[in-house]
Image: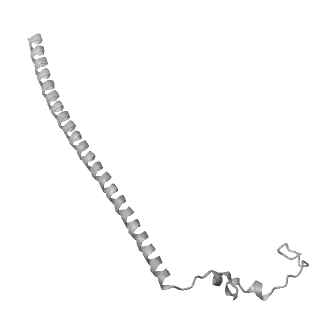
Amino acid sequence: MSGRGMSQTGPKIKVTKEAVQPPMYCENSPMKKKRPPCDKFAASDSLDVFQAAVTDANREVNKLFSKYAEVMSERAAMDSLQIRELEDIVKEVRSLESHLMERKEQLRNSLVVISDKLQG
């Protein structure tokens, strides 16, 4: 046993040139067999396919941006409406507060008059 827990007396493995050299460098490599012949028409067709894919993707992105802009515009309109409603509510609350302060002052004056009559 070595320090790594492996037996040193195991079977010897013969290393061949094929085992060391990856198959992509062999003459009979599947990569070379599968490679299509270079063709100007194939390059042109792939360019057309790529351009069509880019055009379709661009169209989809533009649709998504349009939908996003529409949703954001609707949301901005709703926000604006809600802000106006809140401003109206605040205005009404301030008016009620002012009215209640006046009413409180009137009641205080009435109580002073009643108190003076009772004491005098």
Q: What residue do we see at 44% from left, 74% from top? A: 50
Q: What residue do we see at 40% from left, 66% from top? A: 56
* Residue 98 coordinates in the image, percent (x, y): 15, 32
Q: What residue do we see at 65% from left, 83% from top? A: 33
Q: Quadrant of residue 85?
A: top left
Q: How many marks?
A: 0
User: If the image is split into quadrants, where does the N terminus sit?
Assistant: bottom right
8 with respect to 97 (left or right):
right
Location of residue 45 with respect to 102 vertically, above or below:
below
In the picture as drawn, the residue positioned furthest to the right comes out as 9
* Residue 11 coordinates in the image, percent (x, y): 90, 79
* Pick the front one: 97 or 35: 35
User: If the image is split into quadrants, where does the C terminus sit?
Assistant: top left
* Residue 94 coordinates in the image, percent (x, y): 17, 35
In the picture as drawn, the residue positioned furthest to the front comes out as 41
Q: How is colour applied across the structure in the image?
A: one colour
74 with respect to 108 (left or right):
right
* Pick the front one: 43 or 119: 43
Q: What residue do we see at 30% from left, 53% from top? A: 70
* Residue 19 coordinates in the image, percent (x, y): 77, 84
Location of residue 103 with respect to 90 vertically, above or below:
above
87 with respect to 20 (left or right):
left
44 with respect to 100 (left or right):
right
* Pick the front one: 63 or 94: 63
Q: Quadrant of residue 49?
A: bottom left
Q: Quadrant of residue 82?
A: top left
